[in-house]
Each structure stands twice: as C-alpha cells, then as structure tokens.
Amino acid sequence: MQQGGGSDTEVTWEDQQNINKFGRLNNRFHELQDEIKNAKETNDNLEDASNELILTDEEVVRFQLGEVFAHVPKEEVESRIEQMKEVTSKNLEKLEEERDSILAQMAELKKILYGKFKDSINLEED
Amino acid sequence: MASSSSSSSVAASPGLTERRGIPGAQFVEDVQTYLTQSGLDVNSALAFLQERLQQYKLVEMKLLAQQRDLQAKIPDIVKCLDVVATLQAKKGTGEGLITDFEVSEGIYSRARIGDTDSVCLWLGANVMLEYSCEEAATLLQKNLDNAKASLEVLVADLQFLRDQVTITQVTIARIYNWDVHQRRIRQVAAAKDT
C-alpha cells in the first residue's frame, strides 16, 4: 500500500533553510506583483495626464500638490509630469528586474527540493 | 521575555534564535530523539506545535497591520515635503501661489498663498505647530527617514516570523509522517507474529 505519508526522507537543516528561503521568495514575489501593478497604473495615469495636457489650451493648469490644487503654468506642469514619468518607469524597471531574479531563484530551489523530496513536498501555488 | 535585537541572520547550525519577543522555532534533527527528549507523545507534541502556530499567526496579523500603516504614512510625508519644497521655491519670486482647496466635499475655494516664511505642521493628537520652511522640511525629512527605517525592521521581523512558521509546519508534517511510519512498522510486525 503506497500512502502519501510515512516517508523516510530525512529533513536536514540545509533543507529547512532552502524551504524557508523558498517561502520568503514566494512572499516577496507576490508583493512585487502588487507593486508592479500599482507602478503600471501610475505610469498609465501620467501618460493620460500628459496627453490631456497637450490637448488643453488653457495656460494655467490645476496641479495637485498634496491635498490642494495649485495653479501652475502649463510648461511647468509638463516638465513635472515628464520628471514623474521618468521616476516611475525607472522604478517599474527595477521592480520587474527583481521579480525576474526571484523567479529564477525559485526555479533553482524547486529543482533542488523536488530532487530530494519528490512527491513529499508541494511547491506549487494552490 | 527580554530580548536584545539580535540580527536575524540564518544560524549556521540549527540554533534557537529569538527576535524581539518572537520565540524561535526549534529545528528538529531527528523526530525520535526530539520526542524522547521532550518526553511528549505524538499527540501532545502535535498539539503543542499547533498552538505555537496559532501564536505565530496572531503576531503576524499584528505586524502586517503595522506594516500597512507605515506604508500608508510614507507617501503622505513625501507629499508634504513636496508642498513645502514648492512653497520654498515660490518664496523668492514674490508672486503668490494660487490654489484651489476643498472646503467641504465637492466644494472648492480659491486661495492665494503669499510669500510665507513659515508653515504649520499637523503633529497629531490635535496639535499643530508653526515652523519655518527650512525647519519644516528638516522635520518632515527626519520623519520620513524614521518611517522608512521602522518599515525595514518590520519587514525583517516578518521574514523571521514566516521562517519560524515554515519550520513549525514542516516539523508538524514530519512528526505526523513519522507516526504513520511507526504504525505501519508495528502493523507489519504484528501481522508477522500472528
């Protein structure tokens, strides 16, 4: 009778550390997914804003500063939005790089852990 | 229990580390030795570990709530710094800053902020203090740095906690498996004897 439990494989401290590391990476991966989604949204909003700016013919634009809308000349608003766009896209790039590196590390750990524990361990998303 | 803030670096050997009041989970090298040493039978050991797991979950909820608060606070401070910087920039030019601000929901009014040397900062607890622009910028920057540092410590705490949860869950699984294994051996032995 082949039961799922009752296996004999010993779990060493190194295995435990690998499992811990996998858990940590998985958590960070999910956090990154959310952060990347937010960064993409911000990017899109800034894109829409600068498009609207081009279309408007007003000289003074109400630019949100904290909780109030300040009257700012159009050129200054344009340069501010350009600056914000640069910051967000750099941030987005950094986040995506981190995410890719985490995925690679997780794939490595999966290979090691499945190699030792085969069916006794489950590392997939439920 | 009193604890010095030890670093949460992974120990080279399975030592019992502890971090800021969160007890470390003991790594079990061998299930049989662990059970004999602690003098517990399988069910008591499992119950003890389950209870530990619940305690960890409670602490995790608390830390997550703190983390959410900090993560909301940081963008607020950044916005305030932005406003102060804009006011400082406008100071030299002599023209005021015209803004539309919310008087009530959906109702806005126009204000002209003249050349000011000072701003008022809301410190919480119904207290608002007036500062010069430079002092306000310094104070806000210090608050921002503190918030970021606290967030880092919190994230490290959460990582340590999650590691302990994982160790405990693995230990529970191993003890359970070991018990099943023992029962199978006993069954086989009993079947042989009859």
Image (cartoon, rainbow, N blue to C red):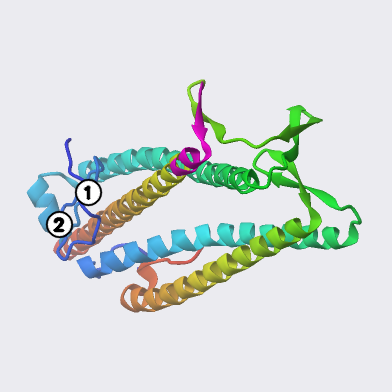
**Disc 1/disc 2 C-alpha distance (Å):** 9 Å
Residue placed under numbered mark 1 in the picture: B24
In this picture, residue B185 sits left or right of residue A80:
left
Q: Residue furthest top?
A: B126
The answer to whether residue B144 of the structure is visible from this angle is yes
Mark 1, secondary structure of its residue:
loop
- Helix, strand or loop at label 2? It is loop
Q: Is residue A11 left or right of residue B116?
A: left
Q: Residue at x 39, y 44 (%)?
A: B146
Q: Quadrant of residue A52?
A: bottom right
User: Disc 1: which chain?
Assistant: B
| Along the viewing direction, whichever of B73 and A98 lies nearer the viewer | B73
* Both labels 1 and 2 in a single chain: yes
- Is residue A87 depicted above or below A110 in this figure? above
Horizontal arrangement in the rendering, residue B135 relative to residue B182 (left or right): right
Q: Earlier in the sequence, mark 1 or mark 2?
A: 2
Q: Which residue is mark 2?
A: B15
- Marked residue chain, label 2: B
Location of the N terminus of chain A (image quadrant)? bottom left
Q: Is residue A3 visible?
A: no
Q: Residue at x 58, y 69 (%)?
A: A90
**Residue range of the region highlighted in magenta in the rendering:** B127-138
The spot of residue B144 in percent (x, y) is 45, 45
Residues marked 1 and 2 touching at CB (< 8 Å): yes
